[in-house]
Image (spheres, helix red, strand yellow):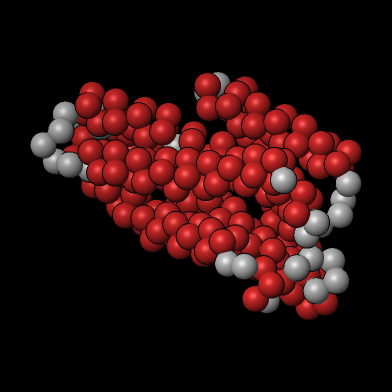
Amino acid sequence: MVDQALFALLHVLVFVYWLGGDLGAFYTSRFLIQPDISADRRLMAAKIVGDVDMAPRTALILTLPTGLALAESKGWVTFGWPVIAGISIAAMLWLALAWHLHFKHGSGADILRKLDLAIRWALVLGLGSWAVSGLMSGASLPFFLALKLLAFVGCILLGLFIRSVLKPLGPALIGLSSSDADTAAVQLAHTLNRARPLVTGIWALLITAAFLGLWTPTTF
């Protein structure tokens, strides 16, 4: 029972840091578009947003190993602990990659960024298929876990869409220090406003997943 409590605690902490980090980044991003803030302070706010955003990025990566460990300890899945350990090691390697990309800038990281992107799409396809199979048959996965997996896949997808939407963010931040700072500020605000509905969508999916985890599995 101690292992179940430990894995449950770790999984809850992942949820807390994901949602809390997202809220922190969301709040700080408001300072990027306030008209009475100088360009250097906007750039400082952008750095803070990027640093704070590593909490939800880390939590996303740790969601699967902690969730599978909890599910294995509860008997909801039966992969075996060697498989769970292997998945956890792979997650740690992915986490190291994510942090490396956070600190490394420039064209030299393009291949690693593509690798990170490929991992996310592979999880969307693999976990999505597993979740759909669980919903249809119920043999490979309990129904509530299949729903949680779909919520997790939805979070990954929305995160990928946010990356696409935020592509103009870098040039807009650089433009704040140029002679055309007003145009850059308008573009910055437009880009962030487009991303906000996607961010709130992630919050909704996270809360849904947490509710499913707290709901007694026997009710399904």
| 63 or 116: nearer the viewer | 63
Picture coordinates of residue 170 (x, y %)? 40, 35
Q: In which quarter of the image is residue 138?
A: bottom right
Query: At 52% across and 21% down in the image, what residue appears?
Result: 103
**Count of numbered tags:** 0
Query: Residue, x 42% and y 40% (percent of image)?
Result: 21
For residue 101, above or below residue 84 = above
Instruction: Say whether residue 158 is left or right of residue 90.
Output: left
Residue 184 seen anywhere in this rendered image of the structure:
no
- Residue located farthest toward the left when viewing the structure as drawn: 36
- From the top left corner, tell me how far across and down residue 90 is, in percent: 77, 35
Residue 109 lies left or right of residue 206; in this view the side is right
Q: Residue at x 34, y 49 (%)?
A: 192
Q: Which residue is rendered at x = 41% and y = 33% of the image?
A: 52
Q: Can residue 91 be seen in this view?
A: yes
Residue 197 x/y as whole percent: 38, 61
Give whichever of 58, 210 is nearer the camera: 210
In the rendered view, would you say 175 is above or below 121? above
Horizontal arrangement in the rendering, residue 118 relative to residue 104 (left or right): right
**Quadrant of the snapshot with the C terminus:** bottom right
**Residue 55 point in image, percent of width and height:** 49, 36
Q: Which residue lies furthest to the front in this view?
A: 1
